[in-house]
Amino acid sequence: MSKYFIFSILFFVIVITSYGQTTGTLQGKVIDVTNDEGLPFASVLLEKDDSLIAGRQTDFDGNYNFSNIEADTYDLTVSYVGYPSVKIENIVIKLGQVVTFDVEMEERVNVEEVVVRAYRIPLIEQSATSGGQVLGAEDIKNMPTRNISNIISTTAGVHQKSKGKGISRAGSRAHSNLIFVNGSPAPKARKGGKRRGKRARNRKLGCPTFGAAGSMATAKEDQTTSSKGIASVEKPSNEEYGSFVENEYIAVRDEALSTFSIDVDRASYANIRRHLNQMQPPPKDAIRIEEMINYFNYDYEQPKDEHPFRVHTEVSDCPWNKEAKLVQIGLQGKKIDLEKAPISNLVFLIDVSGSMSYANKLPLLKESLKLLINNMRAKDKMALVVYAGAAGLIQASTSDKNKLLEALDKLEAGGSTAGGAGIELAYKIAKKNLVADGNNRVIIATDGDFNVGASSTTDLEKLIVEKRKDDIFLTVLGYGMGNYKDNRMEVLADKGNGNYAYIDNIKEAKKTLVKEMGGTLYTIAKDVKLQIEFNPVEVKSYRLVGYENRLLNKEDFNNDAKDAGELGAGHTVTALYEIVLADNYKESKREKKVDALIYQKNKATSLAHSSKDLMTIKLRYKEPKGTKSVLMALPVPKDIKPIAEASENFRFATSVAGFGMLLRASKFSNDLTYENVLSLAQGAKGADKEGYRQEFIRMVKNVSSMSAQANKQK
């Protein structure tokens, strides 16, 4: 008797607890319908009345989870590069219940539409006191029976009594289930129902399942708001970024030359995307505007002469400074036929330390490199080196893809991180297999958390500078979050004749290692430097947008021993200058002022007065294995178009730069708004075959919405 009494008490406690809850959970999986596999790191946004409530990224298997959401009706928007966004409207979250809702997506190119689907309220659902399922109208219509008792009996945890005596709710056990029909408790089951031993399972949209309630923090409790209105999830972080100060305006009378190295790294943009998808404001020093701009390819003309790239210029209005104009300088690298490209000698250097155990690190890394390996040619050779507490060669240089893939599959994470030893061994293997006229490259894949041996930024810089003397180029692939060391990987790429990308999902891996493989792996020009001489008659002051960590001294331009950036096959490089013209000039308080000279005066030449050129661009570059630089020069005439008549290249690059300035809370952004950025980007999306520009537009919309919501709450 006492045993039944205890069971009854437990049963009523669970029921009362369930009804006392004020929140529910929404979870599910984002699925690619073409292969029925989960889409990792997709953006999933929970919205109510067009206001953003919370945002998540799917895990490596495509799963997402919003726990402790207040009971209400919501919309769910899911986006992924190259896929039309899917919006599901009117999802009902009930007290104490878990809604499991899978979202199906289909890859397409050059799409911007949002596929809207309505959430269908289930006819039969199970309470949150145990795992269970939902039967929607479509499910019931397709069942062999329409009898309510028989339908209820298909629910997990519900069974038929022996000899056709009706439906039981698992007696008075503590884990018993409560059945609801259209939101009300189900009537007592009729006798004679047939048992349905097999649990119904349906993943179609509109047929979610209910199960046990989750235990994570509520959406409102785990959010804070940054100064720019971006809701963030506060998490412990040990990420490291190199600090820098934004470029200032410089008076041409004080310094007519501006010198910098090109930058083809694109890591900053993908890293910013990762933070925003997780509802976190990106760290200020993670926002490198030049890398944001250069993440995108631009429609510049291919070179037609002996030089490996072509220079394009354009001048128009500056959207964030009415007193200034904006000059765009674009470099287009020559495309190559990858089938006829030089033989590749690649060494993969893979971090398998304990910090790489997370899904968005070593598992994603392995899938990324599989894409690259499968796209290499039969004549190319690859080796596999790993490092944790020590470094080791696990696959000697080979053209056998199966051997490489098998070795890759066996990798597991564990131990400390001897990055310096790994670099030493990788370069040793690359040098041992050096192809005289080939493409020799080390590809480092890591989160940058080196902690054994040569591990400081200074130590790694010295090491990599020494290694680049062997004409072995470098690609750095960054993975993960939390302990991510962006500053170390940026130094490796900058000092090691290399490029640097951040891989936050498999689509980014495909972009970097497959679609843009030529630019990533094949260098067509190294030590590329630009020096701009401004005409003091036409231009009174200027400011380089971004490139803060790529600035060079003016004497470095003619110094062939000075390292600079590398340009890959098909790569585009874009730089923007804000310039204040003489006829618009008003001395700015932000300008660096220098006292007038006593013993000499800077005077404009007669050419400056007669040419009407705004500036002259000089470039130096070396052949991939060359030691002496080649000089190029071209003037930029005073041909200024209204921004409405500017090219798509100009307007889109400008929108990306403006977005970066707003995220950095730049003092130079003035009255620029996210709406201005959005308008520019939407009008310059162009063909966008891969959907990268549309993804940027969607990201700006999300941040604009969050910012507006935060401003309303102030």
Image: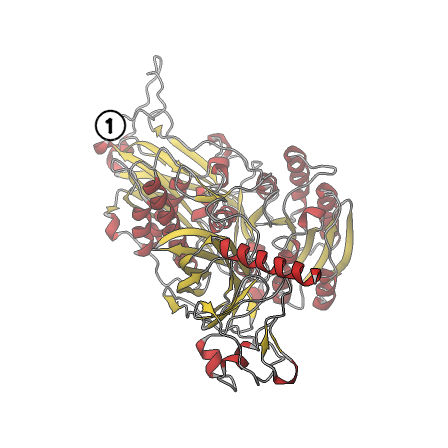
Name the residue type under label 1.
Lys
Q: How many marks do you count on the picture? A: 1
Identify the image quadrant of the C terminus.
Answer: top left
Residue 575 quadrant: top left
Q: Indicate the quadrant where residue 199 lies.
A: bottom right
Quadrant of the drawing holding the N terminus:
bottom right
Q: From this view, report whether residue 513 is shown above or below residue 706.
A: below
Expressed as whole percent of the image width and height from the top left, the position of residue 318 reads 29, 42
Extreme residue in the front direction:
1
On screen, residue 673 above or below 299: above
Mark 1, residue position: 586
Residue 210 spot, x, y in % from top left: 53, 65
Whether residue 366 is situated above or below residue 150 in the rendered picture: above
Foreground residue, 389 or 61?
61
- Front one among 386 and 582: 386
* Residue 3 percent location from the top left of the image: 70, 61
Can residue 301 be seen from the camera position used here? Answer: no
Name the one closer to the observer, 386 or 434: 386
Residue 5 vs residue 623: left or right? right
The structure residue drawn at horizontal position 29% and vertical position 47%, both measured from the top left corner, is 676
179 lies left or right of 115: right
Label 1: element kind: loop
* Depth check, front residue: 468 or 543: 543
Q: Position of residue 530 (x, y in %)?
A: 45, 40
